[in-house]
Amino acid sequence: MTRTGGFQDDDFWTEFHDFLFSEQRHEQAEELLDSSPLLSFPAGSRVLDLCCGPGVFTVPLARRGHRVTGVDLSAPMLERARKRSADAGVPVTHVRADARTYTAPAVFDVVLNMFTSFGYFEDPADNERVLRTMYGCLAPGGTLVLDLAGKELLARRVTPPKVVRRGDDLMVQTDTVLDDWARLRSDWVLVRGERVTRATLVWFVYSAVELRRMVEEAGFERVEIHGGFDGRPYDENAERLVVRAVRGG
C-alpha cells in the first residue's frame, strides 16, 4: 500500500491521472469551447490557463488560434501538457509556477481557472492571493472565467462513496464535510491489481455569495454568476458554479 499527500504532491497527480483527466474530459473541453458563450473570446486572445494540469484546455485553445500560456506547479502535469501540445502541433507556453506568486503584469486578455482548481491552499488568505494573481495578470478590460463545484451543488452530491472503474483499476472516493461547510475532505483509494494507493485532498468550498464577494474584493467588476457553461442561472438546476468577471480599466 502507498499513500500520497495533497494537491502539491506530484505522486498524487501521477497515480490518479487517468481518473482525473480521462479522454472524455479532453473531449468535453473541446465541446465547451465550441458551444459555450462564456468561453467565446476574440480571435488571437492572450489566454492564461492558471492551474492548467495536463493541457485539457490549453491545447484546444491554441488550436483555435489563441496565444496560450499554461501555468501549473506540478512538473509531471506540465510534461503531459507539453507532450499534448507537441503531438497536436500547436504552440503553447508552459510555466512551472505557484498560482499565488506567478506574475505577468497586465499581459493577458483572458484568465481561466477550470474544473475546481481553486481553494486548495490551507490558509484561506492564500486562496485570496490567487484571485489577486488572476487580476494582476489581466490587461484592463480582460476577462476572468473561474469554474468550480459550488457549495450548494456539493451539498446535493456528498453522498455514499463514489466508485469508478477504468479497465481493471478501481477508484473509490469518499467525501466528508469539515468546519461547518467551510471545507471538504476527499479520501481516495485506488486499487490497481494488488497495489492500493490512498490519498487525501482537503479544500475550501464556496457558495456563490462567498465567491462573488471574494472576486469583487480582488478588484474585479461586472461579476456574473452562472450555473453552467451555457450561461444558465445559478439556481436549483445549476450544474457548475461559473464566475465571469472583468478587470476594469
Image (cartoon, helix red, strand yellow):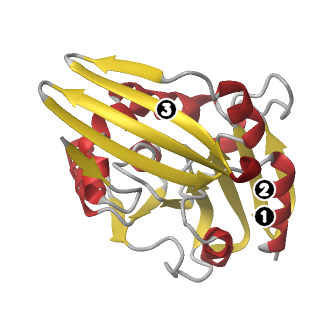
| Left or right of 58 on screen, residue 121 | right
* Residue matched to label 3: 174
Type of amino acid under label 1: Val
Image height of 141 relative to 201, above or below: below
Disc 2 is placed on an element classified as helix
Q: Point out residue 88 in the picture as x, y percentages from the top left corner.
A: 26, 42
Residue 89's tag is: none
**Which image quadrant for residue 156?**
top right
Indicate which disc, 3 or 2, sits on the residue closer to the N terminus. 3
Q: Secondary structure at mark 3?
A: strand
In the shown orientation, is residue 69 left or right of residue 232? left
Residue 211 is tagged as 2
**Residue nearest the observer in this picture, 80 or 191:** 191
Task: Look at mark 1 in the image and give the residue it sits on.
Answer: 215
Within 10 Å of the Cα at label 2, are there few (<14), some (14-19), or many (20+) other Cα atoms? some
Provide residue 29's location: percent of width, then percent of height: 49, 35
Q: Tell me the mark number nearer the camera, choosing from 1 and 2.
A: 2
Residue in the image at 31% along x and 49% along y: 13
Distance of label 1 from label 2 (alpha carbons): 6 Å
Q: Position of residue 216 (x, y in %)?
A: 84, 67
- Residue at 44% across / 40% down in the picture? 187
Above or below for 71 versus 22:
below
Which three-letter amino acid code belongs to the residue tagged 2? Leu
Q: Can you tell which of label 1 and label 3 is closer to the viewer?
A: 3
